[in-house]
Image (cartoon, coloured by chain):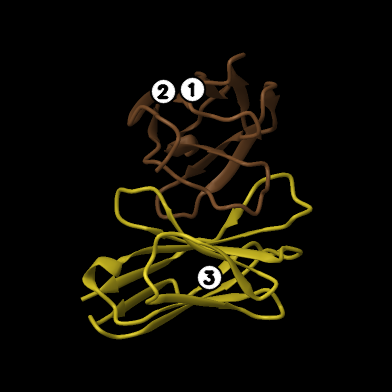
Chain colours: A yellow, B brown
Amino acid sequence: DAGVTQSPTHLIKTRGQQVTLRCSPKSGHDTVSWYQQALGQGPQFIFQYYEEEERQRGNFPDRFSGHQFPNYSSELNVNALLLGDSALYLCASSSPAGRGEQYFGPGTRLTVT
Amino acid sequence: DAKTTQPPSMDCAEGRAANLPCNHSTISGNEYVYWYRQIHSQGPQYIIHGLKNNETNEMASLIITEDRKSSTLILPHATLRDTAVYYCIVGPSYNTDKLIFGTGTRLQVFP
């Protein structure tokens, strides 16, 4: 049983560009959350998708947007990249039938130059 | 902001018990205590959670004080692979809710 997978592993972009990150949830999970983790900090919640809709959102600008597909996979899009967007982007999946835990992927390391 | 306070770092000898404290004095009655850990360059990993009773699983034990204002995560026999940042998180019981991470405790297990 594959866990949460994310692609790509690493990415280098230039300031002002746009980026799309992808996440496939753990089998049987229907909810996907995205987190941003700056160096030396704990992960910060960006938003969560359930039934193809954004259900919750953290304190992130509209440059951050997402999508969830019918197969529960998800994308995170960031427009007009800033140097401060350089971080590890983590995807987590969960299920209402679960015991309370979220399963995290390995993350995508984004570097903005 | 995170609702928990943890020491920034701790050391533990391999084979000994690691006791990681967490203060959550503003916890409300329906909030759970969750513990996750993050090994270098990996995504966070769920360890355990509890409401008011002590909990134990194959990874760790969670001891919550009677007033629920603090808790301790216990790794009974720490190994080098337990070296990681440990996060204590307070939140509702819905496993699909957002997690609010603090800066955690960096546990270093030494030989």
Q: Which residue is mark 3?
A: A6
Is residue A22 placed above or below A47 in the rendered structure? below
The amino acid marked with disc number 2 is Cys
Residue B88 percent coordinates (x, y): 49, 35
Label 1 crowd (10 A; few <14 / some 14-19 / many >=20): many
The amino acid marked with disc number 3 is Gln
Q: For marks 3 and 2, give the one nearer the viewer.
A: 3
Regarding mark 2 in the picture, which secondary structure is present there?
strand
Alpha-carbon distance for marks 3 and 1?
32 Å
Q: Which residue is mark 1?
A: B18
Farthest residue toward the right?
A: A97
Q: Nearer the viewer, residue A57 or A22?
A: A57
Disc marking residue B12: 2
| Parent chain of label 1 | B
Left or right: residue B39 compared with residue B27: left
What residue is at 66 percent from the left and 64 percent from the top? A31
Alpha-carbon distance for marks 2 and 1?
6 Å
Is residue B44 placed above or below A55 in the rendered structure? above
Regarding mark 3 in the picture, which secondary structure is present there?
strand
Regarding mark 1 in the picture, which secondary structure is present there?
strand
Label 2 crowd (10 A; few <14 / some 14-19 / many >=20): many
